[in-house]
Every structure is written in structure tokens, then in C-alpha cells.
Image (cartoon, rainbow, N blue to C red):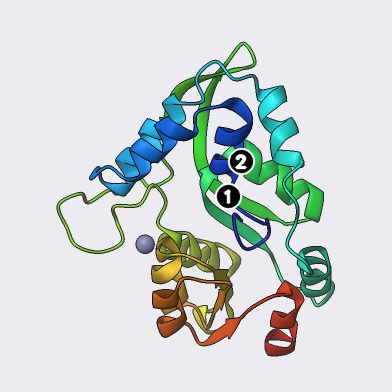
Amino acid sequence: MDGTLLVGRTIYVLAGEVGFEEQLHEVMTSDMQKYEKTREIAWLLKGLSVERLLEIFDAIPLRTGAQKTIATVKKAGMITAIATDSYQLAADRLAKRLGIDRAFANELDIKDGKVTGKTKLNNQKLEPRMPGCKIHSICKRDILHNLCDELGVTLAKSVVVGDGNIDRCMIEDAGLGIAFEAQAELNEVADIVVKGDLSKILEHIL
Ligand SMILES: [Zn+2]
């Protein structure tokens, strides 16, 4: 979602608007595990109303070609999904806006319309002491496998798009793994590298 469907990253935009950029930088540059950072960052949102959060989220611009890409693959009969280490309420919001079928993310605890700071991580199989991808708050490989199982779709027919290290595991396993405006290390494991307009991926899919 962040960086692929949206320009920029939701948490940085929230930090700028709400005013916790310094604290965010501190967490991001700390030596905490990735999933611990996700938990810590949610505390920075404590007290923020859902209304304001979504107002800020809605103003984040879409990537060029995002709407066209989703509309076109849906027309072709594909099922679409968001998997993100951002928040479920944001992912659901964007999914609804773009007509995306499913969304998987971390759950922010909400009470009386406000963020409490607690989170429920999507990844229920954290392996903090193991090397590999299970240190992320969401394992996109697991999401991909589970969704393919549920839908009765072979992995070979799956297409994924990502831009960061967290996307590596799903890009490795998908039938077609696309790195979009991605970090260099992701480009190396992806089947295809795309930059600029997201709808450029369509010529590789359809
Ligand atoms: Zn993973």
C-alpha cells in the first residue's frame, strides 16, 4: 500500500501532520526488532481520533496509474488484495476507495473513537530469534499462501507488487513478483522491475 498504491508512507505523513516526527525517527533508527517498532510507533498515535487519522490518510496522493491498474485487473477477473504493515482501518479505507477485494494489516486498538496505542499484530507467528522474515509485524508470504489456498488459486498464477524489504518473502514465492519503485535489494529478487507509472505492470500481467 505505502509506496505502491500511495505516494509516500502513511506513518510519516501522520507524523508530519500530528507532530511526532522526532519520536518516529528515534524508533525507526533504534535497534529494536521490526515488529517491536510497529508496536512502539502505534503508541505515538495515542489519543488521535480515527476521524482525524482517516482525514490525513485520505489526503495522501495515489500513485500515478493506481486506479487504472486496479480497475483493469479487476475487469480481467483477478482478485485483488492489500497486505501492509500499516493499519487495518487505513487499508480497509483505501481498499473500499479503489474497489480492492481484501485487506490485511495490523489492528489499531480504538476506544471511544480514539487510538489507545495498543496494537494487534497481523503476524501471530513471530520468530524474533530466527533469521528471516518472521520478525515483521505482518508476513506477506503467509498472507499470499493463505489467500491462494482460500481462493483455490495456484501460487503460479499469483502476482504481487512490493517496494521494500518486508515484501521480499512474498515476491520470492509469487508466480510473478514485481518490484515497483523499490529498494535495490528487492529489485534483485523480483521477476520484473517497474518504475514511474504503476499501470506499466499491466503489460506483464494481462
Ligand atoms: Zn514473510
28 displayed left or right of 203? left
Based on the displayed image, in which of its 4 quarters is residue 194 positioned?
A: bottom right
Residue ranking furthest to the left: 129
Q: Quadrant of the N terminus?
A: bottom right
- SS type, badge 2: helix
Looking at the image, residue 161 lies above or below residue 38 = below
Instruction: For the C terminus, give its image quadrant.
Output: bottom right
Residue at 29% from the left image edge and 52% from the top image edge: 135
Amino acid type at circle 1 is Arg
In this view, the residue farthest toward the front is: 22
Left or right: 80 as drawn, with respect to 183: right
* Residue at x 27%, y 42% (from the top left corner): 30
How far apart marks 2 and 1 lie (CA) works out to 6 Å
Image coordinates of residue 52 in percent, x first then y, are 70, 24
In the image, residue 149 above or below residue 7: below
Residue at (59% x, 54% y) in the render: 2
Report whether the residue tagged 1 is closer than 8 Å to ligand 1.
Answer: no
Q: Which mark is residue 9?
A: 1
| Residue 126 versus residue 159 in the image, above or below | above
From where the camera sits, is residue 124 visible? no
Residue highlighted by disc 2: 13
* Residue type, numbered disc 2: Val
What residue lies at 57% left-to-right and 72% top-to-bottom? 160
Q: Is residue 85 left or right of residue 180?
A: left
Residue 119: x and y, percent?
A: 43, 30
Foreground of the two, 64 or 74: 64
Kindly tell me whether residue 93 is visible in this rendering.
yes
Mark 2–mark 1 CB contact (< 8 Å): yes
What is the x, y in percent for residue 17?
64, 31
